[in-house]
Image (spheres, rainbow, N blue to C red):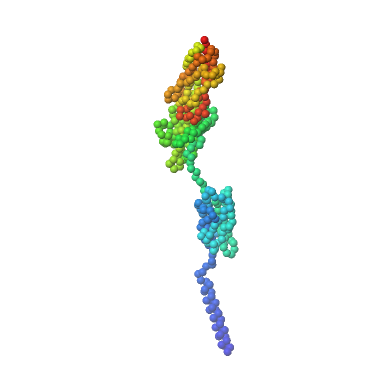
C-alpha cells in the first residue's frame, strides 16, 4: 500500500506540472496590452451650436511617440452678423469618438470670442483617469464683407511739397456728382502756373487711369496714372479726365477735374467817368474792358446788377453792360464794357453807380456760388 501511495503522489505531481505548463503557453501568445492611441482623439470638425460656420480650418496637434508635443489650432470664420459672445460647441460622435474620448469645455458651456480671444479645448480619456491627451486653440472671427467699390475720387490735392509755388496744400472746393460723369473743382490762387501742377489723388477702386485728349470719350482714358504722381498741364484748353476701374476691370467711373481761380473775371479799370451828357439826351460809351484771367471759357451767368446809385432815382440814370463773344470769352481775352447815360428824364448833376458782374465757367453753372463777382464804379455828369 505504501508503494501505491508514492506512485499516486508522483502521478499527481506530474499532472500538476503538466497543467501548469499548459497555462504558461496560453499567456505567452501574440496578444499586446490595450494601448490608447491618442491620434484617434483628433477632431474631424468643430461645429457650433446654432451657428453655420463659413469656414473651419483645423491644424491637428503634433504627436510624437503617442505624446502631444504641440497644440492644434482651429480657426473658424462665421457670418459678419454673428455675435461673438456666448458661443458653444456642438461636438458629436461624428467629430470625436466619444466612447474613448471626452472634450472640455462641454457643449453646454458658452464662451466669448470677442476681441480675437482664443479658447483652449482639451481632449481627455472618456474612462478612467482624466489625463489630458490633446489640446486645440480655438479662435472665431467674422468674415470680412467686401464692400462694393464706389469708384470715386476720394481726395484730390495739390500738395505744397510737390508744388512749391503754392502757398499751402490746396484740395477740392466742390464735387458735382452726375450720372456717368462727376466733376471736381479745385480753385488755386490767381497767378498759378496751370501748365505744371502735380496732383495727389486717392480713390476707391482698383486702378486709376487718366486722359488729356479732348477728342476721346471720357470713359476711354487708358493711361494708368502713376502712384508717384506726375506733372499735369491743366492750362486751357487741356482737359484732365480720370477713370477709376473696379477690381474685375468691368466697371468704371469717370471724373473731370476743373482747375481754375475763384475770381476769373477782371475789370481793367475799376472806376471810370463818362464824358458829359447834355440834359435831355442819352449817350452810350465804351468805358473799359472785362478780362478773363481764369483758366476756362467765361459766359454770362447770373444777371449783372447795379448798386449804390447816388443820388437814388426811380430808374437807372446809368446802365452798364458788357459784351460777350458768341462762344464765350476765352482765357486771356477781353471784351468791352459800355455805360449808357440816360439824361432825358433827369436834371443836370453828377450821378454814380456800381456795376456788379457775375462770372460763369462755361457748362459749369453749378459753381456760380463759388466764383467771386467783379465791380465797376461809374460816374456820369448831366449838363445843360
Q: Across the whole image, how many numbered discs are drawn on residues?
A: 0
From the viewer's perspective, is residue 80 above or below residue 364?
Answer: below
| Closer to the camera in the image, 348 or 16 | 348
**Residue 283: x and y, percent?**
48, 14
Image quadrant assignment for residue 66? bottom right
**Residue 22: x and y, percent?**
52, 76
**Residue 297: x and y, percent?**
45, 26
| Closer to the camera in the image, 211 or 232 | 211
From the viewer's perspective, is residue 327 above or below residue 91?
Answer: above
Question: Does residue 64 show up?
Answer: no
Q: Residue drawn 52% across and 73% down?
A: 26
Q: Residue drawn 41% across and 36% down?
A: 220
Q: Residue drawn 52% across and 74% down?
A: 25
| Closer to the camera in the image, 51 or 122 | 51
Question: Does residue 147 show up?
Answer: yes
| Closer to the camera in the image, 21 or 106 | 106
**Residue 239: x and y, percent?**
44, 30
**Which residue extends farthest bottom?**
1
From the viewer's perspective, is residue 322 above or below residue 367?
Answer: above
Q: Residue 163 vs residue 217: left or right?
A: right
For the N terminus, the image quarter is bottom right
**Which residue extends farthest left?**
215
Amino acid at each position: 500500500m505504501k508503494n501505491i501511495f508514492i506512485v499516486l503522489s508522483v502521478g499527481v505531481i506530474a499532472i500538476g506540472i503538466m497543467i501548469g505548463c499548459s497555462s504558461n503557453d496560453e499567456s505567452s501568445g501574440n496578444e499586446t496590452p490595450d494601448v490608447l492611441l491618442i491620434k484617434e482623439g483628433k477632431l474631424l470638425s468643430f461645429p457650433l451650436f446654432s451657428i453655420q460656420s463659413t469656414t473651419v480650418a483645423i491644424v491637428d496637434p503634433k504627436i510624437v511617440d503617442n505624446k502631444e508635443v504641440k497644440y492644434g489650432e482651429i480657426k473658424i470664420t462665421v457670418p459678419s452678423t454673428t455675435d461673438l459672445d456666448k458661443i458653444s460647441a456642438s461636438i458629436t460622435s461624428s467629430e470625436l469618438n466619444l466612447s474613448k474620448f471626452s472634450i472640455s469645455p462641454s457643449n453646454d458651456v458658452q464662451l466669448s470670442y470677442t476681441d480675437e480671444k482664443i479658447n483652449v479645448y482639451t481632449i481627455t480619456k472618456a474612462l478612467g483617469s482624466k489625463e489630458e491627451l490633446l489640446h486645440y486653440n480655438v479662435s472665431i472671427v467674422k468674415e470680412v464683407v467686401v464692400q462694393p467699390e464706389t469708384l470715386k475720387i476720394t481726395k484730390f490735392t495739390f500738395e505744397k511739397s510737390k508744388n512749391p509755388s503754392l502757398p499751402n496744400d490746396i484740395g477740392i472746393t466742390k464735387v458735382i456728382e452726375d450720372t456717368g460723369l462727376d466733376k471736381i473743382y479745385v480753385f488755386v490762387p490767381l497767378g498759378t502756373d496751370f501748365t505744371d501742377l502735380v496732383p495727389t489723388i486717392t480713390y476707391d477702386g482698383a486702378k486709376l487711369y487718366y486722359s488729356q485728349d479732348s477728342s476721346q470719350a471720357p470713359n476711354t482714358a487708358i493711361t494708368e496714372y502713376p502712384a508717384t504722381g506726375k506733372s499735369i498741364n491743366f492750362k486751357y484748353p487741356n482737359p484732365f479726365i480720370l477713370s477709376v476701374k473696379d477690381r474685375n476691370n468691368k466697371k468704371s467711373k469717370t471724373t473731370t477735374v476743373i482747375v481754375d481761380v475763384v475770381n476769373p473775371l477782371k475789370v481793367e479799370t475799376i472806376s471810370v467817368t463818362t464824358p458829359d451828357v447834355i440834359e435831355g439826351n442819352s449817350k452810350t460809351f465804351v468805358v473799359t474792358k472785362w478780362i478773363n484771367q481764369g483758366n476756362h471759357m467765361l459766359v454770362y451767368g447770373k444777371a449783372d446788377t447795379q448798386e449804390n446809385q447816388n443820388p437814388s432815382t426811380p430808374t437807372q440814370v446809368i446802365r452798364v453792360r458788357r459784351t460777350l463773344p458768341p462762344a464765350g470769352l476765352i482765357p486771356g481775352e477781353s471784351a468791352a464794357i459800355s455805360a449808357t447815360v440816360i439824361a432825358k428824364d433827369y436834371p443836370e448833376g453828377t450821378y454814380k453807380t456800381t456795376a456788379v458782374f457775375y462770372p460763369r465757367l462755361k457748362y459749369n453753372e453749378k459753381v456760380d456760388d463759388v466764383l467771386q463777382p467783379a465791380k465797376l464804379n461809374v460816374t456820369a455828369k448831366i449838363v445843360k
